[in-house]
Amino acid sequence: AQRVTQPEKLLSVFKGAPVELKCNYSYSGSPELFWYVQYSRQRLQLLLRHISRESIKGFTADLNKGETSFHLKKPFAQEEDSAMYYCALSLVAGGTSYGKLTFGQGTILTVHP
Amino acid sequence: DTGVSQNPRHKITKRGQNVTFRCDPISEHNRLYWYRQTLGQGPEFLTYFQNEAQLEKSRLLSDRFSAERPKGSFSTLEIQRTEQGDSAMYLCASSFRERAGELFFGEGSRLTVL
């Protein structure tokens, strides 16, 4: 069965510092990986997906199949980045994401002024 | 369209009672998902629909849980004979089949079983 691990429950950085939120997964096939974010008093929303290879709000994430990791990075953290971040995995069938997501436990990021 | 809406937002019930939650997805979306989230955990998959067909149910979902999406639009999640362990946030999400994995979540329905 697939599994997503986010080893840090809490992560604190100062504004302007680099930030990296770790995500490791276990799955024998080729999954699709996502990062979801939940800001205070807002609903859970998609931040980015690995196939898009986009930078969203300055965040990037690279899928490393050798290390089975999908760490989220931002070179200069901002106070508005403070939120709960979830890494999620979807199985892929026929080149299309299955849709059913397995989430990690989440990391609370706090960016101090 | 204001996004995925769920109601009620909060429900407090006594053990043994039945509860029903409703989810109205984004109207163009053909997939609808239910997740459960407890404190300190990520969302946990319960079940999902493509149009009106329920395609998968989690093995963790007991027989007391039932979900429907009768006309391929809104969905209901019913929990019968609630137990204290059912206390959680129940999240609904929807997506296009072609962009499955890109879920749009509702604000959730919080259940407290006394």
Image (cartoon, coloured by chain):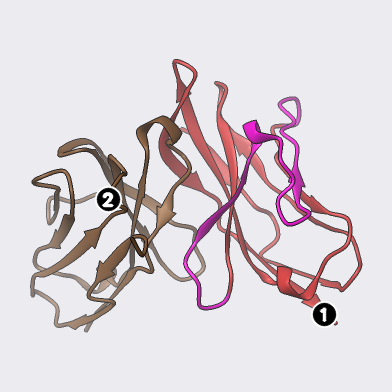
Q: Main secondary structure of the magenta part?
A: loop
As rendered, which of B24 and B9 lies closer to the eye?
B24
Q: Give, as a three-letter code, the residue at label 2.
A: Ser
Asked if residue A6 is positioned above or below residue A111 in the image, the reply reads above
On the same chain, marks 1 and 2? The answer is no
Residue A99 within the magenta-colored segment of the rendering: no
Q: What residue is shown at x 71% (from left), y 35% (from top)?
A: A53
Query: Which residue in the structure is indicated by mark 1?
Result: A112
Chain letter behind tag 2? B
Q: Give, as a three-letter code, the residue at label 1.
A: His
Residue A60 at x, y percent in the picture: 76, 46
Residue B21 at x, y percent in the picture: 19, 66
Q: Say how many tags the image has.
A: 2
Q: Which chain is brown?
A: B
Q: Secondary structure at mark 2?
A: loop
Instruction: Tell me which corner region of the image, top left, top right, bottom left or bottom right, holds residue A67.
Output: top right
Local crowd size for mark 2, using a 10 Å CA cut-off: few (<14), some (14–19), many (≥20): some
Give the numbered dot on residue B27.
2
Residue numbers of the magenta segment: A40-67
Residue B74 at x, y percent in the picture: 18, 54
Instruction: Tell me which corner region of the image, top left, top right, bottom left or bottom right, holds residue B25.
Output: bottom left
Q: Which chain is red?
A: A
Q: Real-space Cα distance between discs 1 and 2?
A: 40 Å
Q: What residue is shown at x 14% (from left), y 63% (from top)?
A: B79
Chain letter behind tag 1? A
In this picture, residue B50 sits left or right of residue A87: left
In this picture, residue A8 sits left or right of residue B91: right
As rendered, which of A8 and A100 lies closer to the eye?
A100
Residue A44 within the magenta-colored segment of the rendering: yes
Q: What residue is shown at x 16% (from left), y 43% (from top)?
A: B72
Asked if residue B72 is positioned above or below residue B106 in the image, the reply reads above
Local crowd size for mark 1, using a 10 Å CA cut-off: few (<14), some (14–19), many (≥20): some
